[in-house]
Amino acid sequence: MITLNSTIKGGQTMKKIISLILAAVMLLALGVSALATEILPDSDMTVLQVTVRKHWYDNDENAHHDDVLADIYVDGKMVKTVTLSEKNNWEAVAELSVDPIPVGEKSNFIDNKVKIVERSIAGYKSEVYGPYEVGFYGNRGEIAYDITNSKMVRIEIPVSVTVKQTGNVAPSSHTFYYNLATRTDRPDANSLDIATYSDSDADYKISYTGALTGDENGFSVTVDRKGTAKGTIVIEGDMNALYGLRGIISKRAQIAPDGWTYDQSEYMFHVGITELAGGKYEMTYAMAKVNPNASSEYIDLGKGTAAYVNEYKEDRTVTGSDTIKIPVKEENPKTGAPAFGICAAVIALGTAAVALKVRK
């Protein structure tokens, strides 16, 4: 009985202890909940955490780059500069104190008042994307930005224009006109519609060298008489923008004067990346000529030339009145001396006789 009573008393004591512990836990939970109710609900933002990450688009996967600086602007004022480097794996975090931003204006503030500006890097194009991963926690805001650095490259596509004389009269100087249409997405491979290739938002520059002159829509070439004029189409931009670029070179509508036959060939090219040894890459182009006998077929030219051969044919009949006789050096059949020597002697004697008659 004593043991039983002792057990009962002990059990009651333990229950009291457990009850006290549970009560304490409940009170603690209520306290934490109350505390959370004061902090976690959305409130004016006074702290902004900004994460900046960098991505390289390069032609050498083993390339090492110097540290890069990026400035953080808030409401038009530069408030912080972060360093991106190999040491921090090209990622930096900055925590900023900002004037209280009301709950209803946080998103607008993030979208329009916070800017990231990377300091220029020679040979690369910089683009900033974001903000991403936007979140608000009480008085805190967290956002992230990505910066891409794409290497600038230059693509050169050779063009030649030849004038072939097929008659007996040489052509005069003549100018030929060609269309150039490019775009950076991937249109229907079988489409040669220039309109589908217009790229009004092109993020690259087109220029010309040699005998070619023009703009982003086409070029002209002047050939002096017969022969060949050469030049290149130069496309410059960053690797990210040029990857996948396609284009068409075609003869522009031009009424051919009498005697001329224009080469109406069409060439297509696309820009891609070729892997080289040692983790390096080359951005280059591949050319194809549209089969004149089947417009849906192409003749692969590799890294070739857009070559045009135009013909000029004019035949003129030479008549007697058109013939100009040129004196020919002939020999005296008796002495072998040049005939013009005798003529000269005769002329000399005649001159002397005239002089003598004048004296008399």
Image (cartoon, rainbow, N blue to C red):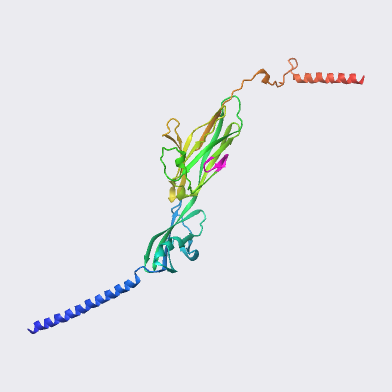
Q: Residue furthest top?
A: 334
Report the predominant secondary structure element of the magenta stretch.
strand
Quadrant for residue 342, please give it.
Answer: top right
Residue 139, picture quadrant:
bottom left
Q: Please determine whether, in this image, residue 163 is positioned above or below residue 241.
A: above
**Residue 121: x %, y % from top left:** 51, 57
Q: Nearer the viewer, residue 258 or 61?
A: 258
* Residue 2 seen: yes
Q: Find the residue positioned furthest to the right.
A: 360
Question: From the viewer's perspective, is 168 left or right of 119?
Answer: right
User: Residue lying farthest bottom?
Assistant: 2
Identify whether 246 is placed above or below 39. Answer: above
Residue 353 pos. (x, y %): 87, 18
Q: Is residue 88 visible?
A: no
- The x, y position of residue 347, in whole percent, is 81, 20
Please state the extent of the stretch shown in magenta in the rendering: 208-218
- Which residue is outermost to the front? 104
Report the label total: 0
Which quadrant of the structure image shows residue 224? top right
Image quadrant where one finds the N terminus:
bottom left
Residue name at image x 77 percent, y 20 percent: 341
Q: Residue at coordinates 47% horizontally, 37% vertically from top-left?
A: 267
Residue 122 percent coordinates (x, y): 52, 55
Question: Magenta includes 78?
Answer: no
Q: Quadrant of the C terminus?
A: top right
